[in-house]
Every structure is written in C-alpha cells, then in structure tokens.
Image (spheres, rainbow, N blue to C red):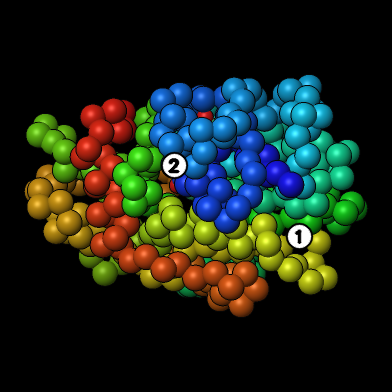
Amino acid sequence: MTTLVSGGAGYVGSHTVAALHEAGRDVVVLDDFSNARRDAVGELRRLTTPDLVVIEGDAADRTAVRQLCDEHDFDSIMHFAAHKSVPESFADPLRYYRNNFLSTLSLAEIAVERGIDRFVFSSSAAVYGTPDQLPVSEETPPAPQSPYGTTKLMCERILADTAASSDLRVVILRYFNPVGAHPSGRIGEQPITAGQNLVPAVMRAALGPLSRLQVFGNDYDTRDGTAVRDFVHVTDLAEGHVAALQADLGTHRSRVFNLGTGAGTTVLELVAATEAVTGRPIPCEIVGRRPGDIAESWADCRRAADELGWCAQRDLRQMLADHWRFVSCRADASPPS
Ligand SMILES: NC(=O)c1ccc[n+]([C@@H]2O[C@H](COP(=O)([O-])OP(=O)(O)OC[C@H]3O[C@@H](n4cnc5c(N)ncnc54)[C@H](O)[C@@H]3O)[C@@H](O)[C@H]2O)c1
C-alpha cells in the first residue's frame, strides 16, 4: 500500500518522505513546485530510491489526483501542500484561502470517494493565536491571528467533519517551529519564496557578510523581551508522521496532536545558540513587532507521547548544527531575503 504525499518536495514533506521510505512504505509525491526546487527531487531520490514517483501538479486539481488514484493503490494521504508564510497571508489572503482551502477540500473529497483509510494533515500552532495558558495543549480553544492560521483551522474543520461522516480516519498534526535538516546534508529547507521563518533568517545572517537579522520586537513580556517559540527538529516531525500513520486512534474518528519539544526558546537565545554552533557572529537589528506574531508559545506534547508513542528526540544544538551543515554546504540553500 502506498501513501500519497502532497507537498512532498517541500521542507517537512521531503523529510517525511525519507522517514516513510525508511519505515518501508511506498510513496508517491505530488507537488506543484511553487515553493520547492526541482533539483531537490534528485537528492530525495538518492536518499530513498531512484524509483521514487514525483508528479508535478496541483493538489486542488481533482482530475489529476483522481488519475493518480487510478494508477496507485493509496491507503493514506499526507497533506503538506500549502502556502505557509504569516506575513504573506496578510498581504495576499485570497491566495492563501484559495490554495490551502481548495487543496484540502479536493483531497478530502477524493479520499472519501476512493475509500482511503487515513489522512494526515499538516496544521500549525498558528491556529492557537495568543494562548491563555502555557504550555499550549490541544484543548486550548483555537483563535488564529492571521489569515494563514485561519486557513489551517478551516482545513482542520473540513477534515474533522469529513471523518465524522465517513470511514476516513484523520490525524491533525499541529507543528510548532520546524528547524534542522536531514543528517545526511542532502535535504533541508530550500524555499523559493521569501519565507519569514526565524531560523533561515538567522542562518542567512550567519552566512553574512552583509546580512543582519531583524528581530521583530524586544518589548514582549518575556525573559529577555523577545518572542519565545518551541523549535522542533524536522526529523522528529517526520517521525511523528510515521507514528500518525500507524497509530491506533481507538474510538476517535479524528484526533489533533501537538508536535513540539515542550521547551520555549527566545529569539536572542536562539541567536546565541546559533553563534555557538556556527562560530560566526550574527548581527541583529531590533525592529517593530510584526502583525500576527504572539509573545510566547510552546507545546504540551503529552497527548502525542501517550497516544502516538512520539517524543522529540533532538535538542536545539542538534537542530542548529544540522540546519547549518545544510545551508553552509549549499550556495543555493540560502533562503531569499
Ligand atoms: N515550516 C513551518 O514553519 C510550518 C509550521 C507549521 C505548519 N507547517 C505546515 O506544514 C506544511 C509543510 O510546510 P513546509 O515548511 O514543508 O513548507 P514548504 O513550502 O517547504 O512545502 C510545501 C510544499 O507544498 C507545495 N505546494 C504548495 N501548494 C501546492 C498545491 N496546491 N499543490 C501541490 N503542491 C503544493 C510547495 O511547492 C512545497 O513544496 C504546510 O502545510 C505548512 O503550512 C509548516
């Protein structure tokens, strides 16, 4: 049996394809390459199998997805394909609603139509907005503060309602902040579009010589005034997806899990840790807060530990060392500014 992986050429998707292959699953990747490089597929094939099937196409294109279903015997879908930048989603919300919503709707419809057993969805801590208590558990009422976060919550609801009325079992994974790269150095984060994630920007500043890191706000009510996030190694996330595919959901038709480490790191702590790992100074410039950013967020991961048997294994130093190995060895891995 085979897993259809939408967005499998992207950052988290490609690491998950590698983990699925290692776990003995067959995989078909569907990606429109709106935020992935075609040459990354060669590296992914070297890491997995030269026969890895990668189809260029839009996950919202039902005709194309139905044709893939005719050609392969899918028992599961992992849906990574989405636009993911919070600032971009404020600038162009309709593009975000269209892509994230329609791709999920189409894949959910086809999953039911074709009797697929399991659907694993990439959601985000962005659905929580400003949490009223920390760590953030799955029971925290969602209140997204950006169009991006709202698209993720809408998709979660489509999938939960679909699961409630069909045989499809849905696992919703709310990632905190994915960081790092595959230990082989072959795959990592190589965005086409200018993402605004922190670690790629920190790495760009470490690569220098002219780059500075913009720190968005140092007046939050946190231990050093900068925002706190829960960084989690992308390989740990990938392993979380394998666990989600195999998990016994008991009586639950759909289930939400946080994937993080349970520890919070400030922006300035992350900068210091990156300086230690890379041996490079990282010049910082403090600028104003960004819309949609919250002060603090870190995950309560007990449900994933209890029900998926999953816990993050890799610490911040390893995340940064693996990320740095990837970006410093590849001129093309430096994210666009
Ligand atoms: N990286 C993060 O910080 C983060 C955090 C929380 C949640 N997520 C979610 O995890 C998922 C994967 O994120 P990522 O960091 O790997 O992003 P990414 O941009 O690297 O990967 C997404 C992939 O999907 C593809 N894609 C986008 N729209 C498509 C469509 N309609 N059809 C086919 N392919 C399409 C892109 O080309 C890209 O390869 C996304 O759904 C994202 O919202 C990411």
Viewer-side residue, 316 vs 176: 316
Q: Is mark 2 within 8 Å of ligand 1?
A: no
The tag on residue 47 is 2
Kind of residue indicated by mark 1: Ser
Q: Residue at x 50, y 47 (%)?
A: 18
The tag on residue 254 is 1
Q: Residue at x 68, y 40 (%)?
A: 4
If the image is split into quadrants, where does the C terminus sit?
top left
Q: Is residue 50 left or right of residue 206?
A: right
Q: Which quarter of the figure has residue 334? A: top left
Q: Residue at x 68, y 44 (%)?
A: 3
Residue 121 image point, x, y percent? 65, 49
Kind of residue indicated by mark 2: Leu
Residue 159 image point, x, y percent? 76, 49
Viewer-side residue, 140 vs 320: 320
Which of disc 1 and disc 2 is earlier in sequence?
Answer: 2
Alpha-carbon distance for marks 2 and 1?
Answer: 32 Å
Q: Residue at x 37, y 30 (%)?
A: 194
Residue 296 image point, x, y percent? 40, 63
Whether residue 226 is visible:
no
